[in-house]
Image (cartoon, helix red, strand yellow):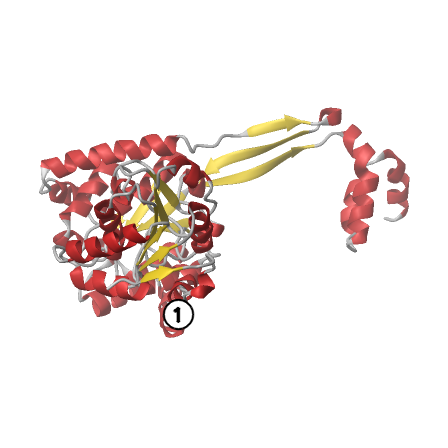
Amino acid sequence: MIEIITLETGNPAESPKLKRILGRTGGLDAEVLVRTDAVVRDVRARGDAAILEYTARFDGVTLTPATLRVEREQIEALAAQVDSELIAAMREAIANIRHYHAHQRAGDWEIERRNGVRLGQRVRPLGIVGLYVPGGSAAYPSTVMMNAIPAQVAGVERIVVVTPPAQFARNPVIAAVLNELGLFEVYTIGGAQAVAALAYGTATLPRVDKIVGPGNQYVAAAKKIVYGVVDIDSIAGPSEIVVIADDSARPDYVAADMLSQAEHSEDAAAILVTTSGDLAEAVRAEIIKQTGHLSRRAIIEKSLRDYGAIIVVGSTEAATALVDRLAPEHVEVMTENAEIDAARLRHAGAIFIGPYSPEPVGDYFAGTNHVLPTGGTARFSSALGVYDFLKRTSIIRYTEAELAQTAGAIDRLARAEGFDAHARAATIRTEGNREITEQTK
């Protein structure tokens, strides 16, 4: 079910399987992009009329502009149906997420240079954010928390939620988390048409500054298309985990953690990188044993067959170097010197250190954000956070004395680029150029 690979040199090119995993991308199908683009253009042109038409066609639900928005009383009534113990767990998770993200707040700053020049940065929250909540048979309240709470901590005043029409009938737990977070501007539209409506605005839905939240391939394609008109969080790819372990690790722990990611989807990746051949064999046996008791067995088996691997390397240094090549979404470090080995890692969405830090604590409860870079993008991107809902404005306060001293340098730099009007805008303000300026009028 899952292959054991021994890398003699630590070079992933030794293994065709690993080379294939490294080459995996989250690219979108060209045909999906074309079909989605047509929907986006139509919603931009026709607004509410297009939204209602696509909702009837794709969701089988007939709505009007007046019934697109869910009443607050309906959300509260649905939330009341949810088990009180689940609500209590939600509240604790929300508190943890708020506490963690509060440390990401950024404030204004200013520095003073020579001649009284003052330079600074002004930090302000985005005005309005759109949150896409996917439908389907499963409900993911944790994802609502992870997307909404950083925006709230940042100070975003208005969060607009869109979700497919049948969402609440199937999943009252989503109503419960919206209620706990105080999110009551909710519209029952899904798919590419919802993303387009948020990006361009309609008579009923406001135009937002940023769209966050996961969705199917059409939602992802729509986010890609509207990026630039609005900001987006990312185009997420399949989930992935890499566990670094040595002889000190328990095989059942390692196997359980790998399976927790393999159950996401058939294209999820679960990989063990270990210095121990004995552990490799023991983990494979545990995976086979534990999979037999899991409800998503068919998905897990295909995921492990196509994108799973157990890789044996010569040292923990080789292990961390290989993981940096993979730049995965999640990394767990279960080695004798876990802190040292984890400190060596440069590229990962989130790092879980030690045997009692399984990946699901990050998904649900610790407070860190589980919206993470996938597909090797941890080389250049980060977890979703408060900073994703803030914008920074540069503040410049120059003085006459400083401009007199630096106008010549500005003049030379501007003229080197062929911009004499730029140069003149600086030199016109200096004493020696006033007469020249008058002569050129």
The picture quadrant where one finds residue 103 is top left
> As displayed, is residue 92 above or below residue 139?
above
Q: Considering depth in this image, is 233 or 209 the residue closer to the camera?
A: 233
The secondary structure type at the circle numbered 1 is helix
Name the residue: 78% across, 41% down. 426
Give the quarter of the figure containing the N terminus. Answer: bottom left
Q: Is residue 201 visible?
A: no
Name the spot of residue 391 as percent of width and height, x first: 49, 41
Name the spot of residue 260 as percent of width and height, x first: 24, 51
Q: Is residue 143 visible?
A: yes
Name the spot of residue 161 as percent of width and height, x first: 29, 49
Q: Indicate left or right for 365 with 197 as reference.
A: left
Q: Amino acid at mark 1?
A: Leu
Name the spot of residue 106 as percent of width and height, x first: 47, 32
> As displayed, is residue 277 above or below residue 89?
below
Name the residue: 23% across, 57% down. 164
Judged from this view, the residue extending furthest toward the front is 278
Judged from this view, the residue extending furthest toward the bottom is 31
Q: Considering depth in this image, is 96 or 414 the residue closer to the camera?
A: 96
Q: Residues within 10 Å of mark 1 (few under 14, many from 20)?
A: some
Q: How many numbered discs, if any?
A: 1
Name the residue: 45% across, 44% down. 345
Q: Considering depth in this image, is 336 or 188 the residue closer to the camera?
A: 336
Q: Indicate left or right for 381 with 438 as reference.
A: left
> As displayed, is residue 118 above or below residue 314?
above
The picture quadrant where one finds residue 98 is top left
> As displayed, is residue 325 above or below residue 180?
below
**Residue with the mark numbered 1:** 33
